[in-house]
Image (cartoon, rainbow, N blue to C red):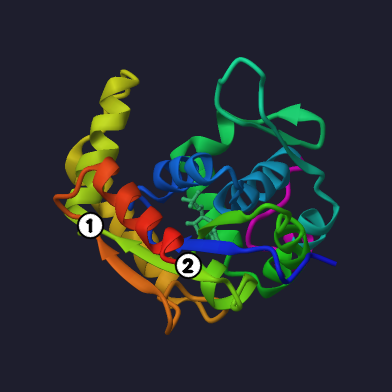
């Protein structure tokens, strides 16, 4: 059983809001563990793809979510956390837009969310946990000590993503990215189970025009206020 006394800081928000980067930096600054729940949904999407499961077959995808062995490994050389799915290093594959779209589709299946409930709660370990996702503050850790809902305009998020992809040498138009972000927002917010919405007790941070350092500082201030 995860220890209820271990502090949890949840950071929820739409895709491209910078949650991943912010959560990692806040976890490092506090010396806490990190749960990247989106990576878990992406890992299930990846496992389903490997097994040739039809993503519209809710029962088959749920079986996949129950049986998938998903592990996170921090390399000693400071490289990004490796995500191991059924024995395979899927770190790069799960970050593709295809895997993101698959994750968003299967995340709407109630059986999948139920299968991942305990897996996510098990990350709550001393000295503390920063949990990044869509329903961390509403469903997985409703008793979290600190809750943040991080957002930015769709245009700003598309611009950030465009810059990232350009740096990786990948050519995608800004207009296409904006359309993808808007479609994913709608799917994540309109689903029946655990839709994307701020917890009633979350602090809202609208990060349009803010730097990463400014957002990290704002989140840390909240956690250090006690
Ligand atoms: O944060 P991300 O882009 O890596 O998440 C991928 C998808 O997984 C996202 O579109 C919705 C889903 N997801 C979810 O439904 N609940 C979470 N807690 C995290 C992610």
Is residue 59 part of the magenta span, yes or no? yes
| Up-down relation of residue 195 to residue 95 (above or below) | below
Taking the image as drawn, is residue 12 in sight?
Answer: no
Q: At numbered mark 1, what does the secondary structure look like: helix, strand or loop? A: helix
18, 205: nearer the viewer: 205
Q: Does residue 42 appear in the picture of this structure?
A: yes
Q: Residue at x 38, y 67 (%)?
A: 149
Q: Is mark 2 within 8 Å of ligand 1?
A: no
- Say if 157 sits above or below 112 in the image: above
Q: Earlier in the sequence, mark 1 or mark 2?
A: 1
State left or right for residue 154 relative to residue 95. Answer: left
Name the residue located 42 percent from the left edge and 84 percent from the top edge. Answer: 200
Specify whether 225 is left or right of 157.
right
In the image, 61: left or right of 56? right
- The single residue placed furthest to the left in the displayed view is 209
Drawn side of residue 4 relative to residue 209, left or right: right
Asked where in the image residue 196 lies, by quadrant, the reply is: bottom left
Residue under label 2, please give it: 226
């Amino acid at each position: 059983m995860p220890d209820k006394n271990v502090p949890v800081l949840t950071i929820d928000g739409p895709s491209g809001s910078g949650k991943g980067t912010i959560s990692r930096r806040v976890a490092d600054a506090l010396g806490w563990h990190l749960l990247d729940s989106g990576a878990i949904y992406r890992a299930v999407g990846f496992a389903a793809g490997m097994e040739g499961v039809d993503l519209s077959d809710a029962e088959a995808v749920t079986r996949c979510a129950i049986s998938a062995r998903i592990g996170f490994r921090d390399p000693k050389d400071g490289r990004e956390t490796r995500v191991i799915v059924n024995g395979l290093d899927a770190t790069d594959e799960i970050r593709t837009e295809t895997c993101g779209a698959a994750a968003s589709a299967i995340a709407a299946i109630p059986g999948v969310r139920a299968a991942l409930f305990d897996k996510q709660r098990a990350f709550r370990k001393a000295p503390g946990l920063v949990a990044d996702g869509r329903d961390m503050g509403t469903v997985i850790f409703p008793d979290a000590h600190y809750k943040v809902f991080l957002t930015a305009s769709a245009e700003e998020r598309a611009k950030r993503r465009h810059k990232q992809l350009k740096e990786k040498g990948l050519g995608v138009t800004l207009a296409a990215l904006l359309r993808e972000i808007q479609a994913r927002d709608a799917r994540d917010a309109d689903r029946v189970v655990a839709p994307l919405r701020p917890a009633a007790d979350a602090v809202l941070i609208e990060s349009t025009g803010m730097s990463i350092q400014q957002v990290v500082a704002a989140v840390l201030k909240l956690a250090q206020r006690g």
